[in-house]
Each structure stands twice: as C-alpha cells, then as structure tokens.
Amino acid sequence: MDAIFDSFIIVSIIKALVIFAVLMTTLAYLQWVERKVIAHVQVRPGPYRVGPHGLLQPLADVIKLITKEDLVPPYVNKVFYLAAPFLAITMALLSISVIPFGPIITVGPVRTWMQMTDLNIGVLFVLAASSMGVYGIALAGWASNNKYSLLGGLRSSAQMISYELPMSLAIAAPLLISNTLSLRDLVETQAGGFWHWNLVGGGQVVSFIIFIIAAFAETNRVPFDLPEAENELVAGFHTEYSSMKFASFFMAEYANMITVSAMATLLFLGGWMAPWPVEYGSSFVPPLIFAFFGLVLLYHGKQAVRKWDKITFPAFGIIFLVIAAIFLIPMVQGWLLPLFWFLAKTGAILFVFIWIRATLPRFRYDQLMAFTWKGLFPVAMLNLLITAFLVALRTK
Amino acid sequence: MDVILFLVFALIAVACAINVVVQTHPISSAISLVGVMGSLAILYLLLGAEFIAAAQVIVYAGAIMVLFVFVIMLLNAGAESRKGRSYTVQLIGVPLLIAFLGLLAFFVQGMSGRETVVFGGFQKGSPRDIGQALFTTYLLPFEVTSLLILIAIVGAIVLARKEID
C-alpha cells in the first residue's frame, strides 16, 4: 500500500512538472504563432529578427517582461491590485489539471493516464474554474482606480456572465449524448472513428458553433475583446499593470484559450481518438504529414532566396523527417499517436482563434449583449431541448 | 490528512466570515464572502459530495458573487465610516449574543448522540443520484422553486421598466 501511495505522489509530481513546463512553453510560442499567422494573413513577415524566423522571439519577450520595472501606482487599492493577476493566472492554469491528453500509458514500471487527475465532475470543474477567473479581471479593473480600467473590468465581467449561459447549455447537449461528466469517459464514448464523434455522430453541429462563439467571448478575444478595446479604453483592465503582472494576464488569456480549445476537442471532436480506426491506416497519417513537410522544406532549401534559409530550411526538413520516422516505431506509437491527434485537433481550433483575430473587426458593446441574450441563448436552449428529446426517444 | 484539510478550510471559512462583517469596504466584504463559499465547497468535497461542491462554486462563488461585485463596482460604493454604536444596541447586543450561543450549544448537544459524520461518507452525491432525487422525490418543490424564480425575474423587469419610463 505504501509503495503504491509513494509512486502515486511521485508520478503526480512528475506529471504536474511535465504539464507545467510544456504548457508554459506552449503559452510563449502560441504568442509567436499568433504573430506569425496574423502577419502572413496581412502579407508581412512578422517577427523575423530574433533567431531564425523569429523563433527566439518568445524568449526575448520573456526576458523583456521579467526585467521591466514593476510599477505599482500610488492610487491603487494595493491588496486587490496585487491579488488580481495571481487570481487570473491560477484559475486559468487550474483547469488544465483535469484535461486528458491521451489514454493509459506504461512508462517502465508505472501505468498511468496522460492526465493529471480524472474527476467524475471534470466538466463542472472546468466551468467552475473559468467562472472564478472573472474575479481576476473584475478586481484588476476595480483596484486600478482608473476609469478606463474600471470600464474594462465591468465589461469583462458582464460579458463573461452573459456568455457563460449559452456556453453551459452548449456543453450540456453532448453530455446528454455521452451520459457522463468525466472528461476521460466522455472521450471513450466517442471511440471508433469520426462518425462516432459528438459533432458528427451526435449531430451536435449547432452546439459546437455556439460553444466556439461563447469561447471567444469567455477568453476576451476578437471579435469580443471589448474589455481591452484599445481605441476606447486604452488597454482596458490591465492599463495600470506592468512587467510580470501584465504578463500574468497575458498568460491567463492564452491559457484560457488552450483550455477552451481542449474542451471543444474533448466534447465534440473525440479527444485523442483517431478520425478513423487503425485498421484503415490512420496511424500512417501523422508520419505522412511530417514527411511531406520535411520534403517540402528540403526542396525549398535547395533554391532558397535568403542567405540563412539555405541552412535553416534543410535543418528543419531533416528534423521533420526524423519526427516522421519516430511515428513509425511501434514502441512509442501507443502514446505518440493519441497525443498527436489531441494536439492536432486542439491546434486546429487555436488556429481558428488566431485566424478570426486577423480577419474580423470588433463588435459594438450593445450588439455583443443583444447577440448573446436574443440570439445565442434561445438557440442553445432549443438545441438542448431537441437533443434531450432525441436522447429520451433513443433510450426508450 | 482529511482532518488537517478540514481544520484548515474550516478556519479559513470562519476567518473569511468574520472578515465579511469587519471590513468597511463593500468589495472587501464581497471577496471575503467568496472565500467563505470556496472553503464551504472544499468542505463539501471532503464529505464526498463532489457535485454539490462544484455547484457551490459555479452558482454561488462564480455567478451570484460576481453579480454582487459587479453591482458594487457599478455603484462605485466607497468605504463605510464607522459610527458610534447607539445605546439600545449596546444594551440588547450582549444578551442577544448570549442567547444565540446558548441556542447553538443546545443544538450541538442534541446532535452528539447521533451517528458520527465520516469524511467521504456521503455516497448519494453523484450528479445521477441528485438528478434522480430532484425529478422524482422532490419534483414539486423543484417546480415551485422554478416558478418562484420566474416571478422574481418578471418582478425585476417590471421594477426596471418603471425606472426607464
């Protein structure tokens, strides 16, 4: 018993450390990806100076943010001003602990899930953490003692309360079909190909769209980024924050983005399950994708225009080919393939987030509120009623 | 482990509850109340009622208290000044406190004979069990509550309309 307990604690600590390290790196590089994607949408190169193709830009940003002067204005409410960024980042990182990245795996003597912990109320836990995240932003706005910050904080809390309703209703519909609140079981019920996913097999297209729209509002992203609308509110709730306190809000926003994308993947897109069973060759898709990009990079490296590309393109091409080869090793396929599918689906949704930021303008505030209460909420309600009716008919 | 967690969060809950009354600024009081709700949720969790714990955080800490904070921020309420207590309050206060403590002691004593509470002892706390109970045994109270909330919503709209007109 003691041995099991010891290994449980050690394994949990290792898992927490690994997830934390990976998450922090992802947060930093998501910023780079966002700047690059938006730049290419707007036909400009984006970050380019720090490292090859600006790849070291996130590192430079982190150093910049840490070494900046940490300013506390004299007119703020000290306690809440200092507590707000902590609250925001803590609640944002908390949800990651229940999100499963893959199935059960064996590392040496230990068999463990690719997940920190599985709660039988995992979905509710994520909702609870996200609803507590409002305090970080609301308090930051209020404690800054500045009318722009206050308006930003007020807008944000009103917006998050309003969009939480359609979001919860949209989450409830696939839960009815899967008949569980555990995120792990939720994915298991969607096994066996994309026609079993809640999006396709469950016919939850409407609730998927509602979830994605509400997710944009919950994470304060364009087109719903009213809390930090530059041209009206300077920078909204984080106007008075600098250095790492500002960075905490920034990281919280990106962590929330990752959480909602992972939630959409788990609820609607079958989590770590492959789009079609391994018997029909789904395990060859990832190596083919990586090999294709590796060959494209090698080809472009041969006729590179810029000086550095002659070295960087073939180098990255070879790295991609090596990754493709790793996917073919049967020993690692057990955990690498589910991880690939989970990350691919989550990444695709994250790309949509960035894509929309590059293309859509901002809503007006009254439009934003009218949209959720008069449009999204009734549709989500109707969708839930119809889904409940169909599920009841099926089980009869 | 359970006992330590219980003591820690029970202490936090009591400290936050006292803080709600002691603080002069409405926002500080509201945030202390959030602390009470959060610690209560963890106490529910220790008893084994996961669903109620999550509902406590989502509904009370996440929705109702956010609205409280929102309204306080909108009204821009400042810190309250402490006025001297009136003579009647001083006169009635102490006997009332003694009476309250006496009642509390009486109820606690009455409970001592019953079966003891065990950590994780609450087994009927899964979402399925609660849903089942809500829609079979307690269907009438549940529906009456929903009607009550509907009346409250209509009342709020009527009151707000008067202000606008």
Image: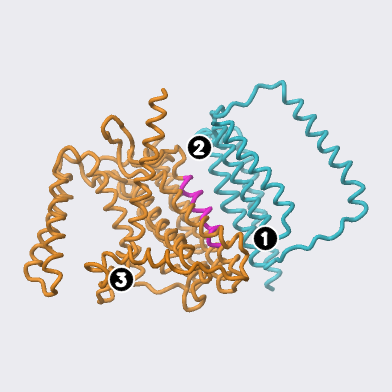
Q: Chain of mark 2?
A: B
Q: Marks 1 and 2, Cα distance to the nearest angstrom? A: 31 Å
Magenta residues, as a range?
A124-138
Q: Colour of chain A?
A: orange
Tags 3 and 1 on a common chain: no
Q: Are marks 3 and 2 on the same chain?
A: no
For numbered disc 1, what is the local secondary structure?
helix
Determine contact: label 1, label 2, CB under 8 Å: no
Task: Tell me which secondary structure the magenta stretch mostly adopts.
Answer: helix
Task: Give the residue displayed 61% in from the left and 41% down from the top.
Answer: B40
User: Disc 1 is attached to a residue of which chain?
Assistant: B
C-alpha separation, residue under disc 3 versus residue under disc 1: 45 Å
Q: Amino acid at mark 3?
A: Ile
- For the question of whether residue A393 can be seen, the reply is no
Q: Quadrant of the N terminus of chain A?
A: top left
Residue A328 visible somewhere in the drawing = yes
Residue B156's label in the rendered image is: 1
Query: Hey, what amino acid is under mark 1?
Result: Ala
Q: Which sits in the foreground, B157 or A296?
A: A296
Q: Is residue A250 above or below residue B65?
A: below
Q: Which mark is residue A38?
A: 3
Give the amino acid at mark 2.
Pro
Q: Nearer the viewer, residue A354 or A309?
A: A309
What hue does chain B carry in this figure? cyan
Task: Name the spot of residue A325 as percent of width and height, x first.
Answer: 12, 48
Is residue A134 a member of the stretch shown in magenta? yes
